[in-house]
Amino acid sequence: MQKGINLGNTHEPPTEAGWNNPKAEEYYFDMYKEAGFQLVRIPVRWDNYTGKTAPYKIETAWLDRIEQVVDWGLKRGLFIILNSHHDNWIKESYSEENKARFDSIWTQISERFKDKSDSLIFEVLNEPHGMTKANNDDMHQRIISIIRKTNPTRLVIFQGNNWGGADDLINAQIPDDDYVIGSFHSYDPYKFGLLGEGEWGTEGDIAALETKFKKVKNWSEANNIAVFLGEFGANKKADYNSRMRHYRTYVSFAQKYGFACAAWDDGGTFRILQREQHNWNEIKDILIHTTEKSPSPIAKVHQDSTVLIQWSNFVSDNDSIIIQRKEKSQFNFSPIATLLPKSNSYTDIKPEMNKTYNYRVIAHYKNSNDLFSQPIELFFPSWERKKKEPFNDTLMAIPGVIPIRKQNTPYMHPKKVYDEL
């Protein structure tokens, strides 16, 4: 379950389709499967469909609906993560009454889904911001004990308190259970990832992110617990090339350190699946086809009339290099060149002017999966040929040299001019 995606802002609004997304449809899961995803995380808010007094019954129609969506994924062989998401009432007040209500919700979920395959995974609570560490530790141990009554070996995901970051996971009390996965979320750095401000991708930026992954990896190995990066992404307002580099780096580090991961897709600011258009944007191919060994490209306008693309190769066994291009407004890339396998530059001659283009470089294999670079964006402006300097026929009279006629003077035979001099 290495490559995952969230079905975000769909079942965790106060009511389904309450945040400008359509209701989930079965074809989403065909698209997930066909794209190459192995895992879909389904965030669910239970609050508005659950009674406020004992026995805190969840509406049957809501359980039926969530089961329907879960089954769409399971029957396609996908791993499905089902959680409690935006149930902020338990975070804001960890009272005895709220604990009893949350216990009841997980009792009912566990009972309803107990016969599903092991590909269904439970996640106790998303981002327990507002809870103390002691509250969060207690809640996870208590809910896992409830789940075990009906699901003795189902995998269960736990997070640290606050926003469920890497340090929160490392500091959390590990539940006393043999079937748990530790999870953290990361949009770092905050101003870039969540607010879309500035640029990202310097050596220092990448090193700082890798330090976080290394810390989690060390914790994972020390405790023999698998890790799930449950959310990551960058706000679409961010600088395009920085944003694509950000996604690529997260995917590369998740692969390098052995973490399953699921990009945040909310259908809006972090959109990946174009739901109503039945299409994907370019982030999908980063999530599926990009690795730390993918080509690493740059592009620039070169000599007025061309675009120069250069890249570093990290493999030598590929069969060719493919260059793809699309206009920014288009969904799909098209190949524009196929090069020798060790090529490291390409010149795109005279593309149409005053347009923004996206390029990517693919290390192509005939008998295995291709390695995609992240896309890079470039604006190609208008250009004009440099005007030739007008012919200057100014006469320069130098003794012993046949003179040249001055501009706008009557023509004189060179010998006559010489004799006069």
Image: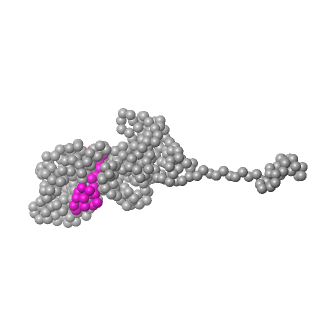
**Magenta residue check for 4:** yes
Q: Is residue 57 left or right of residue 364?
A: left
Using residue 281 as the reference point, say whether residue 10 is left or right of it.
left
Q: Residue at x 49, y 40 (%)?
A: 344
Give 328 or 37, whichever is nearer the viewer: 328
The spot of residue 374 in percent (x, y) is 41, 47
Q: Which residues are magenta?
A: 1-23
Relative image position of residue 231 (x, y in whole percent): 30, 53
Q: Residue furthest right?
A: 419
Which residue: 80% across, 50% down? 404
Q: How is the image coloured?
A: one colour
- Relative to 363, say whether 206 is above or below: below
Which quarter of the image is occupied by the N terminus? top left
Residue 138 in picture, x, y percent from top left: 19, 58
In this orientation, does residue 294 appear? no
- Is 277 within the magenta? no
Q: Tell me which secondary structure the magenta stretch mostly adopts.
A: loop
Residue 286 % position (x, y): 37, 47
Q: Residue furthest front?
A: 410
* Residue at (11% x, 65% y) in the render: 53
Foreground of the two, 65 or 229: 65
